[in-house]
Amino acid sequence: MRRDFFSEEHELFRSQFRRFAEKEIAPKVPLWNERGMSDRETWRRCGEEGFLGASAPEAYGGAGGDFLYDAILMEELADLRAHGLMLSLHSNICRPYIETYGSEEQKQKYLPGTVSGEILLGIAMTEPSTGSDLASVQTRAVRDADGYVLNGAKTFISNGQIGDLFIVVAKTDPSSVPPHDGISLFLVEAKTQGFVRGRKLDKLGLRGQDTSELFFEDCRLPASALLGPEGAGFRMLMQKLQQERLCIGVASIASCRRTLADTVAYVKQRRAFGKPIASFQNTQFTLATLQSEVEIGQAFVDRLLVAHVRGDEIVSEVSMAKWWVTDLQKRLTSECLQLHGGYGFMREVPVSEDYADAAVQSIYAGTNEIMKVIIAKRMGLA
Ligand SMILES: Cc1cc2nc3c(=O)[nH]c(=O)nc-3n(C[C@H](O)[C@H](O)[C@H](O)COP(=O)(O)OP(=O)(O)OC[C@H]3O[C@@H](n4cnc5c(N)ncnc54)[C@H](O)[C@@H]3O)c2cc1C
């Protein structure tokens, strides 16, 4: 279906990025998957070409465009299976914290570098003993005369090896009731003494991403590292999660399209019992059902994109899309793998990678169970 909320400028941007990505990103994907991380040069090239600042404010070097420009990047990267290059984490999940809550000094110091690709961002919420229950984080930031002293451990942090600046969730008041009122956010530079990168974790999927451990060992931060007011961290996180979850929905449905298109092509050429496997009714019904579900999911995600750009509060709806589309992606990749027979189980056939990559979509950015907790709460059920 025609997606007419994208303007001519958006489509021009899409074709510019596609050309760039086919030339400078796609050839590197196998290498990133092998090494377990992307490379700085590609990030820098993305910055140079204007792909890191499409929606960043003009005052700090960005192009000041809307979120749809970045949604286009997410769709094209998903289509190329370039999951190692987490542009949306950088531009749409992390940077908005600085744009919205940063002091003028913090914005001047960091935003231009995030647009050029010299400063790469990550966000460190999850800890070894707590993920969904964010209010229970143990990382401590203790105030002293010069600023704060940070101690704690984080895990599963994307961009953990390549990142230069992390938004770190820490407790400033562990005795606060309710506990989430004791949470603050800090901008922590990787070069700070006491900031230690741990292992790059070995994962089932998303092999091109440097998901890592981070440690803070008496990490001394200036008072100016505090982002927003002390104790307001949890509320700031909740406000920004709408966009984070929409990013997952956008990329997830684009990945579904890629897997489905490849599977349709495969079943037309693979033969069994003297005919293409596409001619079996089971194949037809499976793929017709999945195609219908992808179109339904896309229609919902598109509606949310328009509402989000308009500035609507759509926390419930985005939570619905996050769980529904990522559950679809998990089922779709499994059914498409099955249609590839034994070849679907081979690493060299992309559907096997799609299957492994899909598994995490229902876990990060808030698990799908947590999405239902949010929806139920907003329905007045809890
Ligand atoms: C590849 C990858 C990248 C990631 N990137 C980042 C990152 O950049 N930054 C970051 O901070 N984190 C990141 N994460 C962490 C991710 O956000 C967490 O894994 C996720 O929030 C779940 O937390 P947990 O793993 O501690 O699971 P738990 O919270 O221990 O959950 C375990 C199970 O219990 C269920 N559960 C928990 N609470 C409830 C409840 N109230 N009701 C019903 N069920 C419940 C969950 O849904 C889940 O099924 C990443 C994770 C992965 C795998």
Image (cartoon, rainbow, N blue to C red):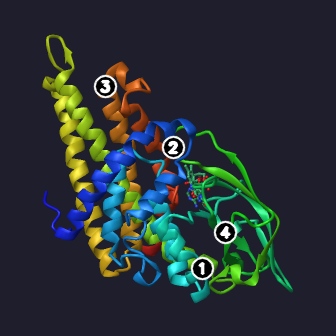
Real-space Cα distance between discs 4 and 3? 43 Å
Residue found 36% across the figure and 57% down from its top: 74
> In the rendered view, would you say 343 is above or below 116?
above
User: Residue flagged by tag 1: what amino acid is it?
Assistant: Lys
Tag in front: 2 or 1? 1
Task: Give amino acid for label 4.
Answer: Val
Q: Position of residue 326 (x, y in %)?
A: 39, 51
Q: In the rendering, which numbered label is found on residue 208?
A: 2
Residue placed under numbered mark 4 in the picture: 168
What kind of element bears circle 4? strand
Tell me how far mark 1 sits from mark 3, CA to CA: 51 Å
Label drawn at residue 340: 3
Which mark sits nearer the N-terminus, 4 or 2? Answer: 4
As rendered, which of 164 and 332 lies closer to the eye?
A: 164
Q: Nearer the viewer, mark 4 or mark 2?
A: 2
User: Dot 4: few (<14), some (14–19), or many (≥20) neighbours within 10 Å?
Assistant: many
Query: Label 2 crowding class (10 Å Cα cut-off): few <14, some 14-19, many 20+?
Result: many
The span from disc 4 to disc 1 (Cα, nearest Å) is 17 Å
